[in-house]
Image (tube, rainbow, N blue to C red):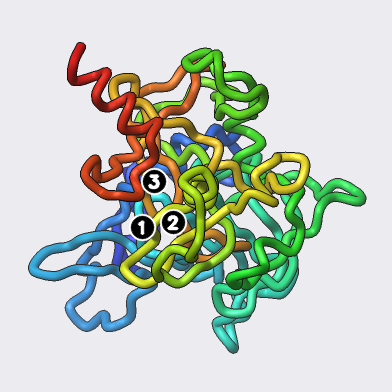
Amino acid sequence: IAPCLSINNGYFSMCDVVPESTKWIRNNGKILESWISSVIPSSGSSQNETFTLAGFESNDRFSKVLEIMSLYGVLWQKYGDGIHDGWLYGITDLKTGEFIKKKTYYIYPNYMTAIQGTFRGDMLRGGKETKATYFRCRGGIMELKFAKLKKNSTLYKYTKRTESFISRHPTQRDPLEMRNVYIGSSPTFPNIAHQDALLAKRNIPAHSLIVYYSGTWKETRGMPNNMTRDDLESYLKNLIKFNSTHHIDVDVENSDIKVYRATLGHKVNHHFVGVNAKFCKVKHPVYGTIRCLESIKPIWRHDEILVNYSYDIEHPFTPRWYKDLYYQKNQG
């Protein structure tokens, strides 16, 4: 089979082993994900060739692709550098190299869910949910076709979190989360409050991004003075460490999904044995770099999402319920 154009552009991919076609193929996300994984550097076809239309990160060997561009101006650009970070996709202005306004797409890591809008650098100035419905190989790159935007659909916009400001639209669900999860009663812990468990809305493969964990942005400091033990445990309930200097928190006032449901990672319950997810970091177009949950095994529809909170059992602030479960497990 005659190679496509991309071999001459500094990269080789799955598009180089299939004939170029104008036919659109229905998208299920898997082929696009496989195509991204297949992109590797190529030396080109000519010794005098100096240009390249792909960017890679590497040390002593090739690591991963960061951007891919066709001679037609179609650009895929990695949005962050983590395994669960998505992509910016769109047509670029051939003079400036910038994405065309209102026609830039953030592609979620399931390679189907998307936000169409305008970005300034990596900051979402405004966008609406859509879906990548079809793809085709053209010019050595995967081109996408998207569903039409729905009238009166939700407008998403970058939110700068502070210690007191949690979200511009706290009841506005994330498009990927709406596909993946819902809140219901826990089948694992029937004694906890109703609507206080995170459940799978569909079958979720292993190593998939399930849900996001955003909230207020708090500096790491000592606990407030004069708190009772009950107050302290309530204060720490949805506080998660982000790095050595900051935590992400969904405080008591925002813990009810009627008040805050922009992200639902804080609703995941702890388990020592039935764990099917873990905490990771991710870059989100609305909330910036935050925490997320990744599946560590296949999760079936209506299963509860469970993680190990991994608290230090010897720490004085470790919740009593956690210690009770820990000692019950080890005595059993």
Distance in Å between CA atoms under marks 1 and 3: 17 Å
Residue at image point 70% right, 58% down:
116
User: Which quarter of the rendering shows the N terminus?
Assistant: top left
Secondary structure beneath label 1: loop
User: Where does label 1 land, which residue?
Assistant: 82
Percent coordinates x, y for residue 308 in the rendering = 33, 34
| Dot 3 crowding, Cα within 10 Å, few <14, some 14–19, many 20+ | some
The amino acid at mark 2 is Val
In the drawing, does residue 102 fall left or right of residue 73?
Answer: right
Secondary structure beneath label 2: strand
User: Which quarter of the rendering shows the C terminus?
Assistant: top left
Residue at image point 36% right, 69% down:
54
Q: Earlier in the sequence, mark 2 or mark 1?
A: 1
Depth check, front residue: 40 or 243: 243
Residue 35 — which label? 3
The amino acid at mark 1 is Gly
Which residue extends farthest left?
60
Q: Earlier in the sequence, mark 1 or mark 3?
A: 3
In the drawing, does residue 211 fall left or right of residue 308?
Answer: right
Residue 282 — which label? 2
In the drawing, does residue 216 fall left or right of residue 61?
Answer: right
Mark 3 and mark 2 in contact? Answer it, CB < 8 Å: no
